[in-house]
Image (spheres, rainbow, N blue to C red):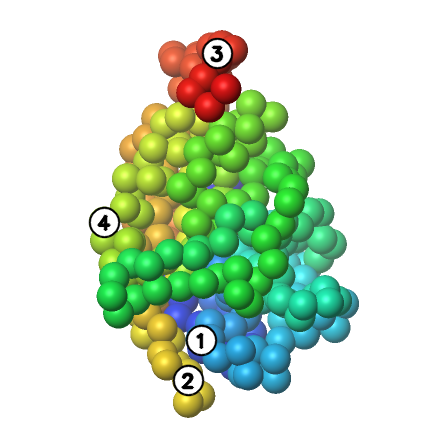
Amino acid sequence: MKAALLQITSSDDPAANLEMLKDRIAEAAANGAGFVLTPEVSNCVSTSREQQLKVLCHQEDDPTLAGLRQAAAEHGIWLLIGSLALKTHDADGRFANRSFLINPTGEIVAHYDKIHMFDVTVSETESYRESAGYRPGERAVLADADFAKIGLTICYDVRFPHLYRDLAKAGADIICVPAAFSTVTGAAHWETLLRARAIECGAWVLAPAQCGTHPSSGAKARSTYGHSLAVDPWGKIVASAGDLPTITYVELSLEEVAESRARISALDHDRPYSGPLD
């Protein structure tokens, strides 16, 4: 299976982002990709809640989801929508950060809401409180595609290895980590975290990323790290991108999953223990 990781610079205009995504998907499909992956918040990168309230939709009404499902069916590909920012019916008005796996007929096979919220203070001038605008998910998701079992995660999840281990022990061959990583933490931790998750799980890790400075209508512009990566089950980086919009291709060999887990069968070696919080 040939996979294509789309590295893009989404604006805060979902309609413009959809047209850009459709063009990139068509290009990837024309180049032989059967599995195309987009980054986190592919439909809208914004630091303005006012703008988000104006342009975001509920899942059932979202034109980006509808357009991307149509694109998957048109090109006959599997599509991982890294995530969409979506309105919910929650009383507190928070959004969902939701990933979708779409099959080649355009059907939604699975969806996943980001569990771990990026509530951090990177420096005196850079802080994030994702939980102020987004509600966390509560369920890990393993999707059964016709070519692999795929674990769905999003961005900050990558710092919580137990989630990845659980997905691998449930049978994940591929674990997706679509992201909009900060430039500071990306430079420090992105590659190391992704390689560690692949090594621990003996699984392919595919991480399509947002990149660059995101066009914004009046609000403070956000910048993201880019450097989309594909890491094989032995922890080797087999495809990578820089910090500009691009498409990164990788040939996935699922035999490498079984080979890696046979060489080091750590997933079978868990043992019960007590402490340290007992």
Q: Position of residue 226 (x, y in %)?
A: 32, 59
Give the residue at mark 3. Answer: 273
Type of residue at label 4? Ala
Type of residue at label 2? Ala
Left or right: 166, with 110 as reference point: left
Q: Earlier in the sequence, mark 2 or mark 3?
A: 2
Q: Earlier in the sequence, mark 2 or mark 4?
A: 4
Q: Nearer the viewer, residue 276 or 54?
A: 276
Residue 47's disc number: 1
Image point (55%, 83%), residue name: 50
Q: Is residue 258 above or below residue 212?
A: above
- Rounded to the nearest angstrom, the CA distance separating label 2 from label 3 is 50 Å
Comparing labels 1 and 3, the label whose residue is closer to the camera: 3
Label 1 sits on a secondary structure element that is loop
Q: Earlier in the sequence, mark 2 or mark 1?
A: 1
- Mark 3 neighbour class, 10 Å CA radius: few under 14, some 14 to 19, many 20 or more: few
- Mark 1 neighbour class, 10 Å CA radius: few under 14, some 14 to 19, many 20 or more: some
Give the residue at mark 2. Answer: 219
Q: Quadrant of residue 179?
A: bottom left
Q: Nearer the viewer, residue 42 or 57?
A: 57
Q: In the rendered structure, are the residues bearing label 2 and label 1 in contact, judged by CB atoms less than 8 Å apart?
A: yes
- Rounded to the nearest angstrom, the CA distance separating label 2 from label 4 is 27 Å
Label 4 sits on a secondary structure element that is helix
Left or right: 245, with 34 as reference point: left
Q: Nearer the viewer, residue 57 or 25?
A: 57
Label 2 sits on a secondary structure element that is loop
Q: Position of residue 216 (x, y in %)?
A: 41, 83
Left or right: 101, with 168 as reference point: right
Type of residue at label 3? Tyr
Q: In the rendered structure, are the residues bearing label 2 and label 3 in contact, judged by CB atoms less than 8 Å apart?
A: no
Q: Quadrant of residue 239?
A: top left
